[in-house]
Image: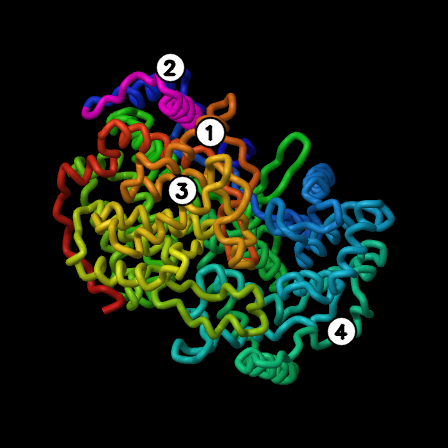
Amino acid sequence: MNKRQDPSIEVLLNEEIEEVVEVLTQRTVHPLEPATDPAQLAMSRAAKALSNRQAHDGHWLFELEADVTIPSEYLFLQYFMRTVDREREQKIAKYLRRRQHSNGSWSLYEGGPGDISATVKAYFALKLAGDSPDDEHMARTRNWVRANGGAEAVNVFTRITLAVFGQLPWRAVPAMPVEIMYLPSWWFFNLSKVSYWSRCVIVPLLIIFAKRPVVKLTKEQGIAELFLTDASELKHMDRFKSGKPLQNAFLLFDRVLKVVDRFTPNWVRQPALRRAENWMREHSKGKGGLGAIYPAMANAAVALRALGAPENDPDFLRTMQAIEYLLIDKQQEAYCQPCVSPIWDTCLSLTALTEAGAHPDHPAVQQAVDWLLDQQIFVEGDWSSQAKKLAPGGWAFQFENDKYPDVDDTGMVLMSLIRAGVHDKENKVKRINQAVNWVLGMQNKDGSWGAFDIGNDHEYLNNIPFADHGALVDPGTADLTARCVELLAMLGYDQNFPPLHKALQFLENDQEEFGAWYGRWGVNYIYGTWSVLAAVGVIGEDVAKPYIRKAIAWLKDIQNADGGWGESCNSYDDPILRGKGETTASQTAWALLGLMAVGEVDSVEVERGIEYLVRTQNDAGEWDEEAYTGTGFPRVFYLRYHGYSRYFPLWALASYARLRRGLPTRQSEIMEQGWIELGPLPVLASA
């Protein structure tokens, strides 16, 4: 881990780690037998390894790796700002070369097919870093790109990058008039109708599109050789498609906007620019940067400079510092993360350790609890525009992202805190109430939950030309809805509670014909199916119901010959590949947790899955996993959570160790004890 990420990070003292492991194997309420069988030995070793990675202030933080576009874009930003660090540039170049496929391309995830946009960006970054187009690895890339449509085939965000660096004319980019800032909420397109991540990326792009900066490069630094035609002559790169009337209508509108844009008077444009700048600055006040995600932060930095902001501008300085915080700078290589995941890593690590037996009073547990409670958000964010009577109280994904708490993190944090006994602390009950009320208020009308907004399901917007990534909105999904069902059930609510009843109906209706659930935020059907089975198991749904039996049968049927489970990101592109892929520790853990949640503890499949985890544990007590099992945007952007192979297998082993002995999991134990009365519920936004 890059020490610059948090200078305060220190591991626990060895004697404290031994205390944790001792508690993991000998709890007061339901003590486990000494770790003599392989599964318990593996659990103890994994718990010790995970405890050893806790920071002294209580949190966990693992690397979060995306594809090569983010480190490539980091280099582009340094060239734009004229702040290139040559040593770091060469480390990033080495990272890019290592990730290249033998055919010259780069993919969106480990082992995936070549992606034209990622490949063009990586090639461009390497060329800026000094690689010669005559080098063998560069020649392979050039041949692959030209054989796959040339640089003309890249996506919109790559086109914008190429336009900024003078490799494409700005007219080749879809229209993004800054006057979008004037559009009212009732209009068919408005910033409140798009997802949080799109909003944060789009607003600075509106400024960039209005200013149209161009960085002058030498001919040798350019990538003209990747185009099949003269790039300077390109105009309309998007084509009308037969059978796509809505998409064609938006494309026609785009061409009209490009004509109108030339005649927009200054008295209209300048106020729109000021409105965009004010929005961007207001949302960049925190140390986490705009949206706490790299693309938005990088766009904001470029936009501020395009507006003439000096280098000592406070918002610009904070943005650049937030970007530097994302860098993983190792001895030989370096890369830039898309964001950081401390809250997600911490709550899942805490869950795994408490399920493994860590006592709520242990200092390591209390540190994690206190740290998580310190991150709770009590200010209104963008979500409040759709829920004006709803009080805040959620958690974000990153260290600081107050405008954008999310339902998934909030649900997982709450369940980890409850496992850690926070509900027994009178001075902390109010905090739990506030968070639960916020989750309830974020439910959609159809009973589902999205990640960051309410009713953000205007799917027609994905047909807009500058939305070719197909992820402009944030609709309710099965995995997030299941998380909320599990939380509410853990709190003692049953199916008669209206929000729960509606949510269960959504989940049953959202099931695929073959029995699984789609995974929006994890790869893919294994993730979605685990999430739902965990929820219906906790709420006490009759596991004999056909829809549950179908899900169980599907998970059992896709088990790999080695006893584990695996699914490639390719399953988002080709449904035939659902549930298929090389085995991973994290996906094996998800399948096991899902099956055990609905009573399949003694099944042959669960036994074989546990044997796989025991057999593949490495000498450090962890699991080796190169695969990308996290999802940013299906078919577009995937994530490798370096923590997934550390805390999910521990969680599965801990649940197995308890259930096989007839002991309740920590979650079930809490539910058996009964729950406190929550405070007044909010006026639900979906009402």
Q: Does dot 1 land on a helix, a strand or a loop? A: loop
Q: CA distance from mark 3 to mark 1?
A: 29 Å
Task: Point out the tag, 3 or 2, that comes first from the N-terminus.
Answer: 2
Drawn side of residue 104 relative to residue 397, left or right:
right
Q: Which mark is residue 593?
A: none
Can residue 85 be seen here? The reply is no
- Furthest residue toward top: 15
Q: Position of residue 683 (x, y in %)?
A: 20, 64
Task: Point out the tag, 4 or 3, that comes first from the N-terminus.
Answer: 4
Q: Position of residue 493 (x, y in %)?
A: 17, 51
Drawn side of residue 536 relative to residue 295, left or right:
left
The residue range painted magenta reads 29-50
Badge nearest the viewer, 3 or 1 = 3
- For disc 2, the marked residue is 15
CB-based contact (under 8 Å), mark 3 and mark 1: no
- For disc 4, the marked residue is 234
Drawn side of residue 400 relative to residue 320, left or right:
left
